[in-house]
């Protein structure tokens, strides 16, 4: 699955200026506690969270996530978006809950 | 190679600058991604702790041919009971830190998990020094 596929499946809005839509997404991870995400999420995963502040970019780049999906229409801070653009991380937002997002991605074949 | 960073306290925004920089240098040195992840995560956790609990501090990262050694030194409140602090889930983080997704009580547990050698020295009221060593080529050790 590509980042583009993830966006379509969730009908999510990409808030970063990304050119990485064709990058591969290999797994999913749901988590709002940053240490748990850092400890457990795999590389190239789609990370589903309600956190929208700049530290998600640090966590995302340290563990090489494929993209970050901010659910429940939580706002993504401006400084987080500009940092994500700098680091080449794709962030998308959706009104869906984290559970609904994970369920939809799973149903469409993401492990 | 030696890298030095000054970390400001309470600055959640800039936390992670030091670990990101070290990560980039290691990437340029073509170190394996899983090794880079070990160093980055352990170092980021320690860096975040400095911001959340102490009032910032200094970080010195030494990149050697076969290992990375990071020393994070603060003059914060210190850790009363290191054994208790090491317990997964134990946290003294503020409400603000918790709302931001920190303070899960997993920081020291992650450091222990990812560092090859972890040393913590702390004196209540004086400060804490955390030393993290990660081998770059563990298969050759």
Image (spheres, coloured by chain):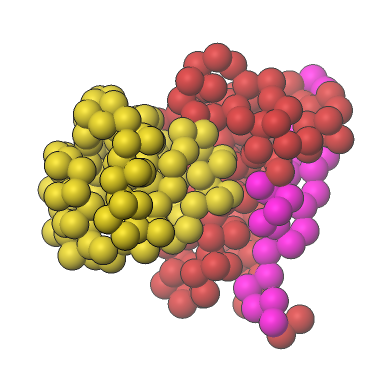
Using the image as rendered, state which of residue B85 and residue A108 is in the foreground.
A108
Magenta region, residue range: B110-139
- The quarter of the displayed image where residue B104 is located: top right
Residue at 35% x, 44% y: name it: A103
Let me know if residue B3 is in the magenta part.
no
Residue B123 in sight here: no
Residue A18 in sight here: yes
Let me know if residue B127 is in the magenta part.
yes
- The quarter of the displayed image where residue B9 is located: top right
In x, y percent, where is residue A15? 16, 39
Q: Colour of chain A?
A: yellow
Q: Is residue B42 left or right of residue A105?
A: right
Residue at 62% x, 50% y: name it: B42
In x, y percent, where is residue B108? 70, 41
Screen quadrant of the N terminus of chain B:
bottom right
Residue at 58% x, 68% y: name it: B35
Q: Residue furthest front?
A: A107
Residue at 58% x, 49% y: name it: A39
Using the image as rendered, state which of residue A64 and residue B51 is in the foreground.
A64
Screen quadrant of the C terminus of chain B:
bottom right
Chain shown red: that is B
- Judge whether B50 appears above or below A38 on screen: above
Q: Is residue B88 left or right of residue A107?
A: right
Q: Is residue B56 left or right of residue B82?
A: left
- The quarter of the displayed image where residue A52 is located: top left
């Amino acid at each position: 699955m590509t980042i583009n596929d993830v966006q379509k499946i969730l009908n999510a809005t990409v808030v970063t200026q990304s050119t990485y839509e064709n990058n591969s997404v290999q797994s999913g991870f749901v988590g709002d506690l940053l240490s748990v995400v850092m400890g457990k999420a795999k590389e190239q995963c789609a990370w589903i969270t309600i956190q929208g502040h700049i530290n998600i970019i640090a966590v995302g780049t340290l563990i090489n996530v494929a993209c970050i999906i901010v659910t429940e229409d939580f706002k993504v801070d401006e400084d987080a978006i500009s940092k994500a653009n700098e680091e080449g991380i794709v962030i998308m937002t959706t009104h869906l809950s984290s559970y609904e997002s994970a369920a939809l991605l799973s149903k469409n074949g993401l492990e | 190679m030696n890298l030095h960073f000054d970390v400001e306290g309470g600055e959640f925004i800039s936390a992670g600058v030091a670990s990101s920089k070290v990560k980039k240098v290691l990437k340029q040195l073509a170190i394996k991604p899983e090794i880079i992840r070990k160093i980055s995560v352990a170092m980021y956790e320690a860096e975040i702790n400095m911001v959340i609990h102490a009032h910032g501090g200094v970080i010195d990262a030494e990149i050697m041919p076969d290992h990375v050694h990071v020393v994070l030194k603060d003059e914060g409140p210190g850790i009363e009971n290191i054994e208790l602090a090491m317990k997964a889930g134990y946290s003294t983080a503020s409400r603000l830190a918790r709302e931001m997704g920190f303070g899960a009580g997993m920081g020291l547990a992650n450091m222990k998990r990812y560092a090859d050698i972890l040393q913590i020295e702390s004196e209540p009221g004086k400060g804490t020094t955390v030393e993290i060593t990660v081998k770059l080529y563990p298969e050759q050790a």
